[in-house]
Image: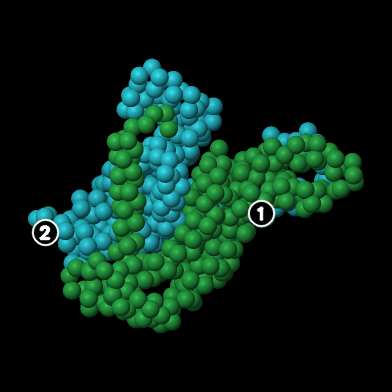
Amino acid sequence: MHKRVIFQDKLLPYLLLAPQIAVTLIFFIWPAWAMIQQSVLREDAFGLTSNFVWFENFQRIFSDPGYLQSFEVTLIFSVSVALLGLSSALVLAVMADRVIRGATTYKTLLIWPYAVAPAVAGALWSFLFDPTVGEVSYVLHLLGVNWNFVLNGSQAMLLVVFAASWNQFSYNFIFFLAGLQSIPKSLIEAAAIDGAGPGRRFWTIIFPLLSPTGFFLLAVNVVYAFFGTFGVIDTVTRGGPAMATNILVYKVYSDSFRALDLGGSAAQSVVLMAIVIGLTVVQFRYVERRVHY
Amino acid sequence: MVENRPWVTFFSHLVLILGVVIVAFPIYVALIASSHTLETVLQGRVPLLPGGHFIENYTDVLVNGIGASSSPPISLMLFNSLVMAVVICVGKIAISIIAAYAIVYFQFPLRMTCFWLIFITLMLPVEVRILPTYKVVADLGMLDSYAGLTIPLIASATATFLFRQFFLTVPEELAEAARIDGAGPIRFFFDILLPLSRTSIAALFVIQFIYGWNQYLWPLVVTTKQSYYTIVMGISRLVNVVDIAPSWNLVMATALLAMIPPVVVVIAMQRWFVRGLIETEK
């Protein structure tokens, strides 16, 4: 954890830590604490007095059909984003690991979406699929698909899943490629000498050795889908139509800033916080395993 | 390559090319749309070949902004984004490297408390605590200011851990030798540790620059004055206009302008970026 050789100084370490700790306390710990307090309080209509109501706010949100729907939407959304993002990245990483000619070029051309902001990705995809002017919608209409994500909930969901996976794809690709390159070539060669073809080698050697990376990425992707996709949702659908894409993080935001239900939105935030903590723990466990295969 | 299977190699290239095309397609369409007039774009289907209004459209958004959405000039938003990205990125690196230095090279009461306090920030993404954080910033009078846009985001557990990880691999003999030669902790930090950390700093620079540039929700809630709008948050105001069709050609020009700086940083610093990304998650 620390060095054997250390410097002796009473004041200096505190001075060095002060900026980081100050920002953490003021902008992270203090608001989080305020949020936890708020989640067990209920304010009157004018915000003048507040009473301690135990877990009433939590009971209230969990008996609210809108909140439960939002939970369901979030689950469908994050599982789809993770599956689509991970599977496409795995396929392309395996191919990129195979080829020799042009490997670097492919890599460069596949990693840049990481740099695109979710909100910008949302704008690009909503233009592509815009019911009246979109390039892809045009083709879909020719094929007889009645495409209108502004009115159709499942189509809206499909679109935000595409935009979000496109955005997260590069991250998965980089990690899968790094994982593939760390698999000893001797293992693959031994299997080839024993007569295993590319498909067999993939399923019996490469895939099992990549699975820790896969689980780690699954956790990262779910965190991304839960919290990182706010910009996608806000530019593409704003939670609509009829709340079909109203994921939890978007609902917290709209309830806090538009509906002004303080206790309820604080309770929602606390639930989300519990989810992040759970996911972070999972992520760290798999990181440990990922390092020593 | 273990064996030579021309068909499998051919198939791999085919899949990769297809992947590259799908990944690039939205950008291509955006680029084309940004070179046409709004009338052409609204006719129903965007042409697949560039038009002749490229320079005109870009000059228009950079200088005048987008009239229909009454946005400020895009050049102003680009400038704000640049300020935000650079301050967040440099700030995060600066305060994290000294925090990690204190944690690794000193022994003092509350050391582990500080470490865990920094660790907890990983579990508190800004989206989760948006309203209370907004209140704190409002109480401190930091709304509509560069300070409000940047300072609340510059704590970084990731960067602190990366530097800590790196400092732990620096041979102990270096600190020992420096001490014998009479260098104090500050001298050791600036003359030895900082130059050694160059690669870690470069890697973090890429990741944090993108993080700062791509912030969306935070600028959305803390800015109400147009003079502090950043380009990424401005995008949604351009897409979600009321009653009329968005000026798609100009919106796409803005979207492309918004992604050029971070994409250039990633591609130019690809080596450090990939290393940094994988290191920070260890």
Image location (x, y in percent) of residue B203: 58, 50
Reply above or below: A195 against A245.
above
- Given the image, on which type of amino acid does mark 2 rest? Leu
Q: Is residue B5 left or right of residue A132?
A: right
Q: Which residue is mark 2?
A: A142
Q: Is residue B58 left or right of residue A242?
A: right
- Given the image, on which type of amino acid does mark 1 rest? Ile
Task: Name the residue: 38% across, 61% down.
Answer: A120
Reply above or below: B82 against A100.
below
Q: What is the spatial separation of the Cα atoms under label 2 and label 1, in whole angstroms?
A: 56 Å
Task: Name the residue: 43% across, 54% down.
Answer: A112
Image location (x, y in percent) of residue B37: 27, 78
Q: Is residue B163 left or right of residue A189?
A: right
Image location (x, y in percent) of residue A279: 44, 38
Q: Quadrant of residue B247?
A: bottom left
Q: Quadrant of residue A68?
A: top left
Q: Of tags 2 and 1, which is closer to the observer?
A: 2
Residue B95 has which mark?
A: 1
Task: Name the residue: 32% across, 72% down.
Answer: B34
Task: Name the residue: 36% across, 42% down.
Answer: A92
Find chain B in the image and tell me its colour. green
How many C-alpha atoms fall within 10 Å of the one at disc 1: few (<14), some, or many (≥20)? many
What chain is tagged by disc 2? A
Q: Compare residues A50 and B232 and report the one nearer the observer.
A: B232
Q: Is residue B139 visible?
A: no
Image location (x, y in percent) of residue A10: 82, 46
Q: Compare residues B197 and A181 and report the one nearer the observer.
A: A181
Find chain A in the image and tell me its colour. cyan
Q: Secondary structure at mark 2?
A: helix
What chain is tagged by disc 1? B
Q: Residue furthest top?
A: A194
